[in-house]
Image (spheres, rainbow, N blue to C red):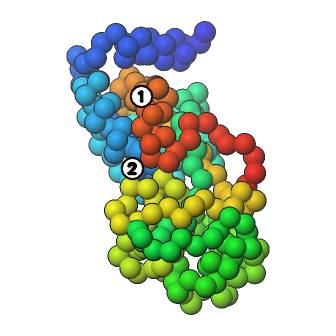
C-alpha cells in the first residue's frame, strides 16, 4: 500500500469513528451545475458529520475547467470525467484522488401539467422539438456542445435555431420562456413547476460521468480527502439517486 493509499485509509477510519473533527476546516469546492441539486443535499450531511464547512462555487464544467487551468485555488472539484482528466494532465489535480462518484443522463423538461410529448424514439424526439414553439438549453458546458452536434446529425439544427433560448433549461421552462428544455435529468428534477417528460431515447442519449478530484495545491488535504470518501459512501449514493444521478456508469448505449 503506497503512502497516499495509507493516508486515505486512515481518513476513512477517522470518518467512521469520529463524528466531529477536532480541527474543522473550510473546504473550497468547484462543482458542476449538473451536480448542484445533489450537492445541496450532501453538503449539510457532511458538515454535520465532519464539523467542516463547505464553500461551494457552481458553474458550467467548461467554465470551471478553465478557471482551474488558470490557477484557481481550491480543495476539491466535481466535474465531468473528460474535464478532470484534462486537468490531471495539466498537473492541476492529484491523479490518485480521481474518483467517479455518479452518472447522469439527459432529459426533456416540460411545465407541470403540460401535455407530455412522445420522445420514446429518435424520430418522435425530433418531431417534438420541431413542433415545439420554443426550446431551451444552456449553450455553455457539456449539454450545449452535445446538443449542437446532435441537432446537426439529426438534420434539424436550422429549424430549431430561430426558436432556441440559450438559457438554463429547467428555469426557462418554469418561467414560460420555453416550452421544452433539454438538460441533465439531475438539473430538471429540483425545479419547481417543471416535470421530466422523459430521458432522451437510448440511441441518442448522452451520459455524463461526475468525477471528484483533489486540487494539486490543496489547502486542507485531510478535510478534502474526508469529503471525497464521503461522496462514495452509502448515504451519499442515496442522496444522489434521489436527485436523478446513478451511482455507477450506465451500460453503453449513447454518446
Q: Secondary structure at mark 2?
A: helix
Looking at the image, residue 255 lies above or below residue 88: below
Please state, as top left, top right, bottom left or bottom right, where the N terminus lies in the image. Answer: top right
Percent coordinates x, y for residue 3 in the rendering? 54, 13
Drawn side of residue 145 relative to residue 23, left or right: right
Residue matched to label 1: 235
Q: Residue 167: name its quadrant.
A: bottom left
Foreground residue, 184 or 118? 118
Res 191 visible: yes
Percent coordinates x, y for residue 161 in the rendering? 60, 86
Q: Which is more N-terminal, label 1 or label 2? A: 2
**Circle 1 crowding by C-alpha within 10 Å: few under 14, some 14–19, many from 20:** few
Drawn side of residue 143 relative to residue 126, left or right: left
Foreground residue, 128 or 158? 128
Q: Secondary structure at mark 1?
A: helix
Percent coordinates x, y for residue 215 in the rendering? 46, 37
Res 141 visible: no
**Circle 2 crowding by C-alpha within 10 Å: few under 14, some 14–19, many from 20:** many
User: At 68% from the left edge and 64% from the top edge, which residue is drawn?
Assistant: 120
Drawn side of residue 235 relative to residue 69, left or right: left
Looking at the image, residue 205 lies above or below residue 215: below
Percent coordinates x, y for residue 111 in the rendering? 42, 71
Foreground residue, 75 or 255? 255
Q: Dots 2 and 1: beta carbons under 8 Å?
A: no
Please state, as top left, top right, bottom left or bottom right, where the C terminus lies in the image. Answer: bottom right
User: At 56% from the left edge and 33% from the top edge, which residue is drawn?
Assistant: 99
Looking at the image, residue 96 lies above or below residue 139: above
Looking at the image, residue 36 lies above or below residue 111: above
User: At 34% from the left edge and 62% from the top edge, which residue is drawn?
Assistant: 192
Residue matched to label 2: 37
Foreground residue, 99 or 83? 99
Amino acid at each position: 500500500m503506497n503512502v497516499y493509499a495509507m493516508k486515505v485509509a486512515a481518513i476513512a477510519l477517522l470518518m467512521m469513528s469520529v463524528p466531529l473533527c477536532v480541527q474543522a476546516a473550510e473546504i473550497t469546492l468547484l462543482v458542476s451545475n449538473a451536480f448542484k441539486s445533489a450537492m445541496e443535499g450532501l453538503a449539510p450531511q457532511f458538515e454535520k458529520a465532519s464539523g467542516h464547512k463547505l464553500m461551494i462555487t457552481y458553474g458550467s464544467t467548461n467554465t470551471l475547467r478553465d478557471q482551474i487551468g488558470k490557477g484557481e485555488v481550491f480543495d476539491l472539484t466535481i466535474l465531468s470525467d473528460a474535464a478532470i482528466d484534462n486537468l490531471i494532465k495539466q498537473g492541476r489535480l492529484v491523479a490518485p484522488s480521481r474518483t467517479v462518484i455518479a452518472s447522469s443522463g439527459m432529459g426533456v423538461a416540460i411545465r407541470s401539467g403540460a401535455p407530455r410529448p412522445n420522445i420514446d424514439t429518435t424520430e418522435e424526439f425530433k418531431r417534438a422539438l420541431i413542433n415545439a414553439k420554443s426550446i431551451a438549453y444552456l449553450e455553455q458546458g457539456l449539454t450545449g456542445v452535445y446538443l449542437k452536434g446532435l441537432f446537426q446529425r439529426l438534420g434539424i439544427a436550422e429549424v430549431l435555431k430561430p426558436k432556441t433560448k440559450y438559457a438554463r433549461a429547467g428555469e426557462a421552462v418554469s418561467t414560460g420562456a420555453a416550452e421544452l428544455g433539454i438538460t441533465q435529468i439531475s438539473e430538471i428534477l429540483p425545479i419547481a413547476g417543471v416535470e421530466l417528460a422523459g430521458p432522451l431515447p437510448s440511441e441518442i442519449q448522452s451520459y455524463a460521468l461526475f468525477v471528484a478530484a483533489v486540487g494539486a495545491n490543496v489547502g486542507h488535504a485531510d478535510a478534502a480527502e474526508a469529503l471525497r470518501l464521503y461522496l462514495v459512501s452509502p448515504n451519499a449514493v442515496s442522496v444522489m439517486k434521489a436527485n436523478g444521478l446513478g451511482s455507477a456508469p450506465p451500460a453503453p448505449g449513447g454518446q
